[in-house]
Image: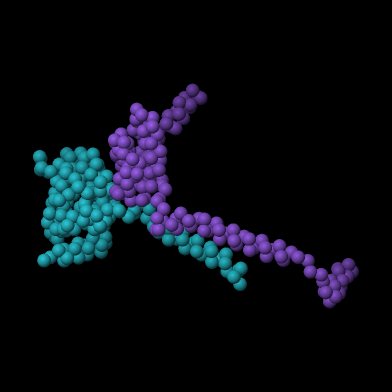
Amino acid sequence: MKVILLPLLMLLLAAPLLAAAPEEFDDPAKQARYDSMLREMRCLVCQNESLAESPAELARDLRREVARMIREDKPDAEIRAFLIERYGDYVLYRPPLRADTLALWLGPFVILLLALIGAAFYLRRRSRGHKETPLDPAERARLKRLLGEDETS
Amino acid sequence: MIRAVLPLLLLLMLAGLLWVGLGLDPGRVPSPLIGKPAPAFELPDLERDGETVTEVDISAEGVALFNVWASWCPPCLDEHPLFMALAAREEVPIVGLNYRDQPEAAREWLARHGNPYRRVAADSDGRTGIDWGVYGVPETYVVDGEGIIRYKHVGPIDETILENEIMPLVRELQAGEAP
């Protein structure tokens, strides 16, 4: 059973690689650039996959274009600009830091800061509330009465 | 008072955010090409052997629709009758981009379902589609008489989109062009 299962499992795991059919380079440095670049790009057809892993035809076309530009030694910025010109910032998994993306970049930290301030206030008030204040004579008498009643019942 | 209301307020704000997010269509990505000149191309004419179609042909007669379609794309067939009816009205020329398709299959498709296009450019390898930022066929663009892209719709158009979004824009642009 295992003899059949293992190759089958391996085949199953290898299927996404076959589907993505990446471009190959002779130069390892170019290969590394190509691989890291594609991982940063979103495939617009299946939006939860990067260009590196998507089996969509558009992703294959775009991989071919990126590979062509890398073979031509175009700088990363130019390749990125090529894709942004056509598909917008949306192709980037890491959007550029600009006035209209400020909320996206800083929002989480602002919320974290607010949460920390809120927590600090809460903890300070709680620790202050724990300070023991001595009972005044009236309260003491009431306590005695309550305890006394409790004992008798 | 604030202590009691604050968590509720935060919950409502979060719910509001998620509610809005739920209504957004992640398939609709704003095109960076709007307001820019139509990307250049020179492709074989699908129907006339030896002739080519370029981006200049789109706006040769003024405002035009540019429709990206393929014979392998079922939603293209859904929107097709609308384009047939529109072509019959002769209000605005429609130029087609046959995206990643076999020319024979595309010609057969047009012969069977009717041809609403003034010209059809055959983008067999999808290279021109990349320049136009095509990511989901069908796509429909409005290109003005100056060759500037004014509007883009991803996915099949329907009666509502055509009459409420596309045609008012087309008429507005045509009115602007009239001497």
Q: Residue at x 45, y 29 (%)?
A: A10
| Residue at the extreme top | A3
Indicate left or right for A153 with B124 as reference.
right
Q: Is residue B3 visible in the rendered structure shown here?
A: yes
Q: Is residue A142 visible in the rendered structure shown here?
A: no
Viewport quadrant of the C terminus of chain B: bottom left
Q: Which chain is cyan?
A: B
Indicate left or right for B110 with B25 as reference.
left
The image position of residue B105, as x and y in percent, is 19, 40
Q: Nearer the viewer, residue B67 or A84?
A: A84
Q: Please, is residue A82 above or below residue B178 in the view? A: above
Q: Nearer the viewer, residue A122 or A151?
A: A122
Q: Colour of chain A?
A: purple
The image position of residue A121, as x and y in percent, is 63, 63
Q: Residue at x 27, y 53 (%)?
A: B33
Quarter of the image where one finds residue B1: bottom right
The image position of residue B27, as x and y in percent, is 35, 52
| Residue at the extreme bottom | A138
Indicate left or right for A140 with B49 as reference.
right
The image position of residue B142, as x and y in percent, is 22, 57
Q: How many marks?
A: 0
Q: Residue at x 15, y 47 (%)?
A: B54
